[in-house]
Image: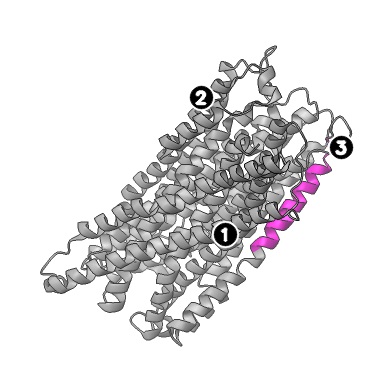
Amino acid sequence: MALLLGLVIFAIYLFRNTTPQQESSGLGRATSAYITVAAFLFGALCSGVAGYVGMWVSVRANVRVSSAARRSAREALQIAVRAGGFSALVVVGMAVMGVAILYAILYVWLGVDSPGAMKSTDLPLLLVGYGFGASFVALFAQLGGGIFTKAADVGADLVGKVEQGIPEDDPRNPAVIADLVGDNVGDCAARGADLFESIAAEIISAMILGGTMAKHCKIEDPSGFILFPLVVHSFDLVVSSVGIFSIRNKRESGVIGTVEDPMKTLEKGYSVTILLAVLTFGLSTRWLLYTEQAPSAWLNFALCGLVGIVTAYAFVWISKYYTDYKYEPVRTLALASSTGHGTNIIAGISLGLESTALPVLVISLAIVSAFWLGRTSGLTDEAGNPTGGLFGTAVATMGMLSTAAYVLTMDMFGPIADNAGGIVEMSQQPESVREITDVLDAVGNTTKATTKGFAIGSAALASFLLFSAYMDEVAAFAQEPFKQVDIAIPEVFVGGLLGSMLIFLFSAWACSAVGRTAQEVVNEVRRQFIERPGIMDYKEKPDYGRCVSIVASASLREMIKPGALAIISPTVVGFLFRILGYYTGHPLLGAKVVASMLMFATVSGILMALFLNTAGGAWDNAKKYIETGALGGKGSDTHKAAVTGDTVGDPFKDTAGPSLHVLIKMLATITLVMAPIFL
């Protein structure tokens, strides 16, 4: 699909307009087309490799964690964290190296900054294809991985736990292998590609805005403003490594009650990472963003970075509050399970809806604060107008993602611990070993939810930056100002409605894909239990391969429709309204309608993703809380109601929710790449 889309992009770029800057530097349509397609395919390849690395490490680490759990909880925790850390550092390192290599090759090949050649401030716009390629593969990885893992999980739970009354990862369940494989596919591979795409898109959009601002302000050496994002993320690798290696639980006991809470241990490592990130961010701004035109501007930008770091911490804390069973929301949800399945569903949906409020307040405060700090930095254009506002927001996004490697470590920790628990159950280890992996698994559920919250926050900021970059690019191609979008114009308002509808339709298709595939798994598992009665007495072995094959083929098939919707919608809408604008005398109508579509889709997508992720995570941990022995424990009616809630929440938190924040960034990058055909 990436190769096919690459050909489409190539054809579009061969017939598109060129900007005055490209014409003056001799960059023709053919060269521009080759560069964009090569960047797109390189980004797609790197995103795929990032996902593969995440899974390659996970499947080797989980068996080691399950073995370590037989000796001590401390050792199991440390192996799980370091395995997750290795994947995270490779993913972030690839994102930085990919952009740096592409920038360096283009810089040398095009002879940038030499007389008559392209200026370095215009070069980042050629990298947009890389971000689009990364988000394209990440969307399909997240969609396909989410459908795979949740269809297997739902099928295994409904028949195994509810109908047959056997434990979660019991080897007698024919869907258990598909479920365990799904954790690696849906959480490690998909999240690796997702975070890779987030960092790549944020680096490129910040480079574009830094270059544009440097050009408007006539800064003599703009390289610091362009390369700043790469330096920040290089420091991220260093500070996150220190945070990962700081995790050392001192107590050497296998009895879980005497071991320090794993969540507290992970939070200590995160605190170390944040402290170092603040220091390195301040040094980076002084080193690269100092300019004689505004000597105190670097300090304002350092404060923007601090706003981003605080925002990241706030998102992690809010997600933890709503999904960890130590806090009131999840305990209230668990209590609702005691009165039946219906009240559990009502409580879970209301909790998810409520959880959108605090993150939106935090992200709103962050955008306004960062924009204001950037605007008052002292940097002005030739007319004396302040120009640092958007770059300030870009720096805040960099601050938020300056601990991305450690946050991704916490996310990768989740599926590794989950699979270790499955291996312990399947190999019939003593109950004390399962207790250790259960605690690590519950913590992993919380860290996965906090990572999703973090990813949504960064997606909101990155989409705002990409939206601004899109408006700049439209202005450059149209050679007229494009600074605002008026939703009072009927066509523009319709574009906004279509953007919101896209989010709801995409979510519906993603959830229904899980439902349809889960039905196939349920029917297969029931068939095996009926036709092979010896499975329950360990006299016959289930056919695990049949369930794996059902979810693998279904996930590949089912991800195409929602994925195609995301790619085709903005292009078709923009092109149709461009034609309408041509006949009605409004040349920028297509670009304005797409801008409105992007704005509304971003707002709707952020709220929907917050709702889906938090509700799903809370349902899962309410079930885990009951399984600790609370409110009747395993096998009780309360537990059965909680399992229903967890089943409903599965496609929410691991398929539709995570896919949405990838979707809104992909919509932003696709409009940036396709901007010329809207004019």
In the picture, measured across the screen, residue 177 lies left or right of residue 289, that is left
The x and y percentages for residue 233 are 58, 38
Q: Which residue extends farthest top? A: 115
Q: Specify which label sits upstream in the sequence, 3 or 2.
A: 2
> Which SS type dominates the magenta stretch?
helix
Pick the quarter of the image with the N terminus. top left
Q: Which residue is disc 1 drawn over?
A: 501
The residue carrying pointer 2 sits among few (fewer than 14), some (14 to 19) or many (20 or more) residues within 10 Å by Cα, namely: some
The x and y percentages for residue 437 are 36, 64
Q: CA distance from mark 2 to mark 1?
A: 34 Å
The residue under the point 41% across, 64% down is 512
Q: Are marks 3 and 2 in contact (CB under 8 Å)?
A: no
| Type of the residue with mark 3 | Asn
Q: Specify which label sits upstream in the sequence, 2 or 1.
A: 2
Q: How many marks?
A: 3
| Type of the residue with mark 1 | Met
Front-most of residues 437 and 679: 679
